Image (cartoon, rainbow, N blue to C red):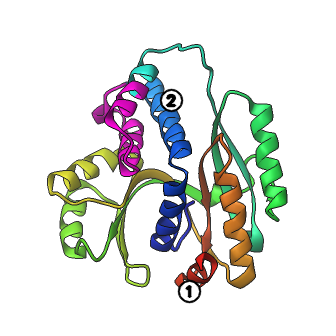
Amino acid sequence: MSGHNKWSSIKHKKAALDAKRGKVFTRYIREITVAARAGGEDPDANPRLRSAITAAKGVNMPKDNIERAIARGAGGDDGVNIDEVRYEGYGQGGVAILVDCMTDNRNRTVSDVRSAFTKGGGSMGESGCVAWMFHQKGQFIFDAEETSEDDIMEIAMEAGAEDIQDNPDAGCIEVTTEPAAFASVQDAFESAGLKSQVAEIAWIPENTITIEGEAAEKLLGLIERLEELDDVQNVYANYDISDEDISQIEG
């Protein structure tokens, strides 16, 4: 789940992921395997693979699992044909939603995604209907209580980051990069001993829509339905929900 109120969304998502760790491991194994197959087994030369490994480590995936997934991908044909597909649609309040999937059965996946949109009160759209509202960026999100903006800024700008934003309301600091600069910025942070809560190449919305009250609760429910599907890897949406609303929903 990726929305504008990032730190609250991250904490909300991490709690859900912890409760479904086995499914989460499966998703990261799939992503690592496909990334290694597409771009090679060297994380230093394959930003997508490096991002996937970082994310897997963030949910405490064992090193052996990661290494097996890399070897499987780098080994080429393992008898399983996995396609990457994207579906698009709308949630409550006209929020744009991108759903990235990996599947060995497109018919099953599109049926599952369409059903989740319908049951969650959203609507599935045609290809390209909302993708233009997003752009691909590398992003790092730090807990503002653990890392200072000054430390982050000095390292990030020197390494080629694009932008740094302090979000005191959400308690986080976000660094964005062009995808090509993701690996070098990550190297710089790691060398300086700065640990981010999130390090990924993601689809970031150009603008956001503020959602409140019952609509916010229904929107998060729709996104959760989509994320629970076995073939779904990531869900991106251009919403902004307040900390207060998220706290009430979680409570």
The image position of residue 233, as x and y in percent, is 58, 45
Residue drawn at point x = 52 percent, y = 68 percent? 12
Residue 235 in view (yes/no): yes
Q: Residue at x 35, y 28 (%)?
A: 67
User: From this viewpoint, which residue is outermost toward the left?
Assistant: 192
Relative height, residue 86 to residue 219 (above, below): above
232 sits to left or right of 9: right
User: Where is 190 relative to 50, above or below?
Assistant: below
Highlighted range, magenta: 41-69
Give the crowd class for mark 1: few <14, some 14-19, many >=20 residues within 10 Å. few
Secondary structure under tag 2 reads helix
Disc on the earlier residue, 2 or 1: 2
Q: Disc 2 versus disc 1: distance between alpha carbons?
A: 38 Å
In the picture shown, does residue 199 fall above or below 86?
below
In this image, 229 relative to 152: left or right? right
Residue 151 at x, y = what percent? 18, 70
Q: What amino acid type is highlighted by mark number 2? A: Val
Q: Main secondary structure of the magenta part?
A: helix
Q: Which is nearer the eye, 69 or 169?
A: 69
- Label 2 sits on residue: 34
Quarter of the figure with residue 238: bottom right
Residue indicated by mark 1: 244
- Expressed as whole percent of the image width and height from the top left, the position of residue 225 reads 71, 56
Question: Looking at the image, how many numbered discs can be counted on the residues?
Answer: 2
Disc 1 residue type (three-letter): Glu
Q: Which quarter of the rendering shows the N terminus?
A: bottom right
In the image, is 73 to the left or to the right of 140? Answer: right
Q: Residue at x 49, y 41 (%)?
A: 25
Which type of secondary structure does the marked residue at label 1 adopt?
helix
Residue 203 visible in the shown view: no
The reply to whether callout 2 and callout 1 are in contact (CB within 8 Å) is no
